[in-house]
C-alpha cells in the first residue's frame, strides 16, 4: 500500500505541531499553567519538528531531499521523546528525590555561563515533576511523548519510503 503524498504528510505533521503549541499557549495564558523548564524545551522541539515539516511540505523535494527533511524531523522528535520521557520519569519520583527548583531565567542569564544554563534546564527541576493538568488520565508530558513518538514514526516512514 503506497503512503500518502509526502507533502500532505508533512503539512499534516506541521498542523499537529501548531495545534499542540497553540494548546500549550492556551493552557499557559488562559488557564494560568506556567510551563516548567522541560515544558519549554519540548515546545522548542515541537517548533523544530513543525518548521521542518512545513519547509518540507512547501519545498516538496525529491527522494534525497525528503530523506534529509525526515532525518531532521526524526532528530527533533527523538530529542522530544527524551525530554518528555525525562519529565515523566521526574513525575514518578518520590518528593524527597526530586531535583531542586531553578532560580529565575533572568538571574541565570546574568550569573551563569550559557552551557550551565542549558545543562540545568535539560536536567529538570521539582517544578517539572508537578502534574497540573490531565486528559484521559495522561499528563501533558505523556501526551507530548505520544505526539513525538507519532511524529518519529511518520519521519521513519518518510525516511524509509521507496518512491
Image (cartoon, grey):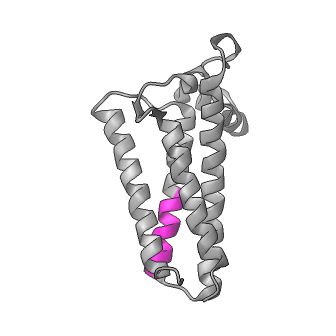
Q: How many marks?
A: 0
- Residue that appears at 53% across and 38% down: 141
Q: Is residue 121 visible?
A: no
Q: Is residue 145 visible?
A: yes
Residue with the most extreme front position = 1
User: What quarter of the picture does the N terminus occupy?
Assistant: bottom right
Residue 140, magenta (yes or no): no
Q: Quadrant of residue 27?
A: top left
- Residue that appears at 59% across and 68% down: 155
In the picture provided, is 16 more to the left or to the right than 111? Answer: left
Q: Nearer the viewer, residue 135 or 100?
A: 135
In the picture provided, is 19 more to the left or to the right than 103? Answer: left
- Residue that appears at 61% across and 57% down: 76
Q: Position of residue 87 (x, y in %)?
A: 61, 33
In the displayed structure, 99 sits above or below 31; it is: above
- Residue that appears at 64% across and 78% down: 67
Q: Position of residue 14 (x, y in %)?
A: 43, 64
- Boundaries of the magenta span: 48-58
Q: Position of residue 5 (x, y in %)?
A: 46, 82
Amino acid at each position: 500500500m503506497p503512503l500518502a503524498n509526502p507533502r500532505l504528510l508533512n503539512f499534516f505533521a506541521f498542523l499537529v505541531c501548531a495545534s499542540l503549541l497553540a494548546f500549550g499557549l492556551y493552557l499557559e495564558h488562559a488557564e494560568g499553567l506556567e510551563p516548567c523548564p522541560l515544558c519549554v524545551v519540548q515546545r522548542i522541539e515541537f517548533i523544530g519538528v513543525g518548521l521542518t515539516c512545513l519547509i518540507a511540505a512547501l519545498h516538496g523535494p525529491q527522494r534525497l531531499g525528503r530523506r534529509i527533511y525526515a532525518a531532521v524531523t526524526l532528530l527533533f522528535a527523538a530529542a522530544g521523546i527524551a525530554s518528555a520521557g525525562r519529565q515523566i520519569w521526574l513525575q514518578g519520583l518520590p518528593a524527597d528525590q526530586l531535583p531542586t527548583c531553578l532560580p529565575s531565567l533572568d538571574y541565570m542569564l546574568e550569573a551563569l555561563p550559557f552551557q550551565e544554563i542549558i545543562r540545568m534546564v535539560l536536567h529538570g527541576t521539582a517544578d517539572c515533576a508537578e502534574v497540573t493538568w490531565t486528559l484521559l488520565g495522561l499528563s501533558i508530558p505523556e501526551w507530548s511523548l505520544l505526539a513525538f513518538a507519532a511524529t518519529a514514526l511518520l519521519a521513519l516512514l518518510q525516511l524509509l519510503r521507496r518512491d
